[in-house]
Every structure is written in C-alpha cells, then in structure tokens.
Image (cartoon, rainbow, N blue to C red):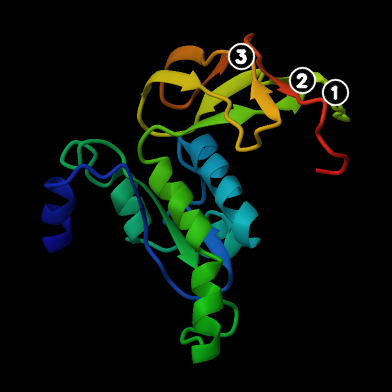
Amino acid sequence: NSLKNFLATRYFRNALNYHTYSNLLIYPYGALEQETPDSAIFREFARDMTAYNGYTYGTDQQTVGYSTRGNSDDYFYDGYILQNHGKIFAMTPEVGSTGFWPSQPEIFPLAIENVMPNLYYAYVAGEYVSAINPYFSQQYFNPGDNVDLIIPQLRNKGLSDAANVSITLTSDNPLITIISSPVNVGNIASRTTVNNSQNLSFTIGGTMPADV
C-alpha cells in the first residue's frame, strides 16, 4: 500500500528499479511471455541507453530466461494506470557481472557506466528532441568555405510534447562565422518525428590554419 499510495500522489513518467547483476536492462512484461503494446518505445529507450554501457536488453524471458510475477516494472507500467496518472515506463538495470555484492573497487566503475543511461532516462521523462542523421554538405573543410549543416529530421523521443523548438548553431572559434538564422521548428508531439528542410550554415575564415 505504501508504494501504491506513493505512486498515486506523484506524476512519474518513467522509472528505473536497480538490481544486481548480469549487465542487463530489463523491461516489461516480466510476468507474461510477451512484450507490451509499447514495446517499440521500450526498445528504443533500451537501445539508446545500452549504447553507453553495452548491457543486453529485453524482457525477463529474453534476458534471464524466466518470468517474474508481481515485479515492480509490470506494476509501474500498467498495474494501476488511472491511479498512477498514466503508464510509468519502468525498467530494471541488472548491474555488474561478478555477483550480488560487487567488491569496493568495482563500485565506481559500475556507477560511472550507468551515469549516461540515467541522464538519458531523466531527459526522456520530459521532451527530448534529437537530430536524426545530421551531416555536412562536404566531407573536407578548407579556409574560405561556406558549409551547410543539414538536419533532415528531428525526433522527440521524450514522453512529453515539445513546444517552440528551435535549432541554433554557435561557434567558439572566432574564425568560424555563423551565417544562418535560428531555425524555428515549432511544436513536436511526444514520440514523433518531423522533417526539416532548413539548413544551418557557417563560413570558415580564410586564415584558418590547417588541421584545426
């Protein structure tokens, strides 16, 4: 009841329930031998997070090979949707590879390898807009060149809508001059991708030394 009341009086969008061990990232369902209707969301989140630490991701059956009834991730996800103000996208990192109680020298490295996944999951609780497949208009840059940064698409990976999105290009090098205005994209709904046809541009100064 304490956990039930705690969740019902907050507005959580996602959660991580940390366990040890096996270097895994597990998402629902745990009790059923199937994925959730939101499996595409869980897979995208898990794929992005494990890119930082190399953990294996999947459901209980796909990772540890057995089901777990009554687990916290299932409960958070769709145990009490109305009371919890919507689904809570909960996952379980199983940290480490040497046992349930890592040795003291292992603790900092294990914490460090999970910093970026933790930050990512905090970001996607709100709006989190990412550039999809950005590229430059040319492979090599020379002094005097005008270069375009092309961002064909933007994706809001977050669980909340993004409002008044804009893209701005800046430089901390005085020999690089930004010649494009900020690109106003507008609103991007949660979990959607929009096309972008406006490029960002800059000029490389004629006195730019080589190999900078």
As drawn, the label of residue 180 is 3
Label 1 crowd bin: few (<14), some (14–19), many (20+), radius 10 Å: few
* x, y percent for residue 127: 39, 32
Where on the picture, by quarter, is residue 11? top left
Classify 37 as above or below 201: below
Say what secondary structure mark 3 lies in. Answer: loop
Q: CA distance from mark 1 to mark 3?
A: 17 Å
- List the residue tagged with mark 1: 138
- List the residue tagged with mark 2: 147
* x, y percent for residue 201: 68, 17
- If you read the primary sequence from the N terminus, does the residue marked by circle 1 or circle 2 appear first? 1
Circles 1, 2 touching at the beta carbon (< 8 Å): yes
Residue drawn at (56%, 40%) of the image: 44
Label 2 crowd bin: few (<14), some (14–19), many (20+), radius 10 Å: many
Q: CA distance from mark 3 to mark 2?
A: 11 Å
* x, y percent for residue 193: 54, 20
Q: CA distance from mark 1 to mark 2?
A: 7 Å
| In the foreground, 199 or 121 | 199
Label 3 crowd bin: few (<14), some (14–19), many (20+), radius 10 Å: some
Residue drawn at (17%, 60%) of the image: 3
Say what secondary structure mark 2 lies in. Answer: strand
Residue drawn at (16%, 46%) of the image: 10
| In the foreground, 12 or 139 | 139
Say what secondary structure mark 1 lies in. Answer: loop
Task: Report the quarter where the C terminus lies.
Answer: top right
- If you read the primary sequence from the N terminus, does the residue marked by circle 3 or circle 2 appear first? 2
**Mark nearer the viewer, 1 or 2:** 2
**Mark nearer the viewer, 1 or 3:** 3
Q: Answer whether residue 16 is visible to the viewer in this image.
A: yes
